[in-house]
Amino acid sequence: MHNKVRFGIIGYGKVAALHAKALETTEHAELVSVSGHRQERRDAFAHQWGLNSRNSVEEMIKEDGIQAVVIATPHLQHYSDAFLALNAGCHVLVEKPLALSVAEAETLIIEANKRNLLLSVIAQRRWYPSCKRIRHAIDEGYLGTPALAQLTILGWRDEAYYSSDPWRGSWEHEGGGVIVNQAPHQFDLLCWYMGEVAEVYGRWANINHPYIEVDDSAVATVLFKSGGLASIFVSNSQRPGIYAKVHIHGSSGASAGVQTDGGAMFIAGRSSVLEAPYNDIWTIPGQEECRAQWQKEDEEFFSHIDATWYFFAQQEEDFARAILEGQAPSVSGSDGLQVARIIEGIYRSNKKGVPVKY
């Protein structure tokens, strides 16, 4: 196995800085260059992280020999940036969400497969110990078949947050609100546990953010191809924020859940991860008493890492090793497609008043 994969990054904002920090720490990845439209900001980012500043992904390939890119641009640019990078011959790791429509996600998957390139989407919460325990419990059959799920986000975003970047809060530049920005992490966990999405019916609202155009809240039901059902309740309207949780209830009658975020929810570039995720529900027979010890272990673990970038590094190392070993990464483009189905399904069903089937 060759030593390191040469990475470029597309984008130079707050999240890009966290990825740059993460890539500094990975064993099999090396960040060498950055590209983006605004040269002054791009050059400043390159200077800060010791990178080459390039005009395009093609230039990063030609001048720096990059093999892969991390795309950390605003949501509406993800599809076009990923498409161009794949066509240029790069493996692509996209910030969430992979795309804002099912058609765009499917096109990216086709392009990657056609060129024998890897396509993945950031889903770093899968590396949380508490989230991995649920996946392990499912794999071991401790829940029977995952049958019911509940996804809840009760958070808050203030006017300063929406003013912090010019693209936030508009349909034209952000493409949506809580549905496309905050909820995709939990949507990904939901699909990781429950499987492929078959049908979505949802409604969205803007409850108390008159200074933005987009949704700050949504409710939805999801039918999975397995026959499982989920309820989704996501909102940025609760001040202060309360929590974000994903709970899985199995056919065996046992349940497992995770609080992925506490009330002081992480905001890239503005806050740190203040509360360790933990398993808030665990009723698997013989394991009920483990929850307190796991929470203690998780709090101890989180006290010794910087969780704002540590789990990005875990996923980026996984992606780099997949490239070097010719294997599939832990998170695939198809995983990003499931999240795109939920996002698109909520918006489309809200508009049409009927469930959206996939």
Image (tube, rainbow, N blue to C red):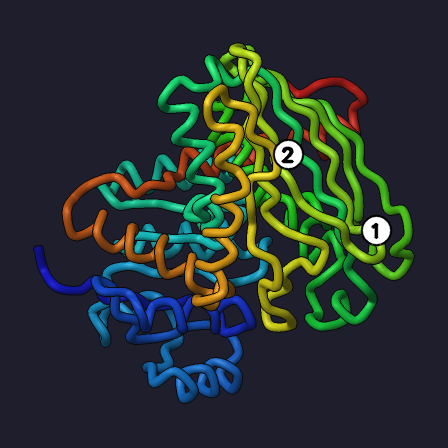
> Which amino acid lies under the numbered mark 1 shown in the image of this protein?
Gln
Query: Marks 2 and 1, Cα distance to the nearest angstrom?
Result: 24 Å
Q: Is residue 260 above or below residue 339?
A: below
* Residue 200 rendering spot, x and y as whole percentages: 66, 23
What residue is at 41 percent from the left and 48 percent from the top?
127
What residue did someone put label 1 on? 238
Q: Is residue 205 visible?
A: yes
Task: Give the numbered dot on residue 344.
Answer: 2
Left-right relation of 259 to 323: right
Nearer the observer, 197 or 54:
197
Left-right relation of 245 to 354: left
Classify the position of the N terminus by image quarter: bottom left
Classify the position of the C terminus by image quarter: top right
Q: Mark 2 against mark 1, which lies toward the viewer?
A: 1
Left-right relation of 165 to 67: right
Q: Is residue 358 visible?
A: no
